[in-house]
Image (cartoon, grey):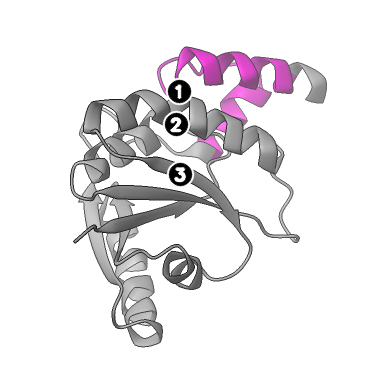
Amino acid sequence: MSRTGFYSGSFDPVTLGHTDIISRASRLVDRLVIGIGVHPAKSPLFADDERVAMLEAETKPIAKAAGIPIEVVTFSDLAVTAAQRFGAEVIFRGLRDGTDFDYEMQMANMNGEMAPSVQTVFVAASPQVRHIAANLVRQIALLGGDVTPFVSKAVAARLATKAKGKR
């Protein structure tokens, strides 16, 4: 029996914190689907296709190391609905601190009511990436700061290009 996991977020941009969770989740399933949430009311720094491309590039070595397929998709409905659509039995949620836990626990309980067959698994972020938040990375980049401790070199280059266009 093959087990599929689903990990969702805005990934604007994908950070080392995200890839930490993806790497660790990839060892627990036979297939991992990364869902990029697309919401018309939000205006992300990176377009949907740019976020897909970044995630595909960042997850390729993770998939190879884990020996599983990792698929990157976009969705515009509820994460739990998207997880079901892609055949996931497990939703992975990354935790950085207690504040994340409180929010994620509420969401897990709500998702459990809507889709009892889909379990939520919390994955604690590794200590070296626990402080990273994509919204702060965006702010640092847009203000000309160094984001290399928080993202890969490839993502840092994309951020630098994007930030130049916004200044």
Q: Amino acid at mark 2?
A: Thr
Name the magenta segment's main secondary structure: helix
Task: Tell whether 140 sits left or right of 120.
Answer: right
Mark 3, residue position: 71
Magenta span: 135-163
In front of the other: 58 or 45: 58
Residue occupying the point 19% across, 61% down: 1
Q: How many marks?
A: 3
Q: Quadrant of residue 84?
A: bottom left
Q: Position of residue 9 (x, y in %)?
A: 49, 51
Query: What residue appears at the point 41 percent right and 50 percent down from the top-left corner?
Result: 33
Q: Up-down: is 27 above or below 54?
A: below
Three-letter code for the amino acid on which mark 3 is drawn? Glu
Residue occupying the far front of the picture: 1
In the picture of the structure, the residue carrying the numbered disc 1 is 151
Whether 149 is drawn above or below 63: the answer is above
State yes or no: discs 2 and 3 in contact (Cβ < 8 Å): no
Task: Check whether the beta carbons of the residues at disc 2 and disc 1 lie within 8 A of each other.
Answer: yes
Query: Where is residue 73 shown, x and y percent of the image?
Result: 55, 49
Element under label 3?
A: strand
Element assignment for label 2: loop
Which mark lies nearer to you, 2 or 3?
A: 3
Residue at x-position 30% and y-position 27%: 64
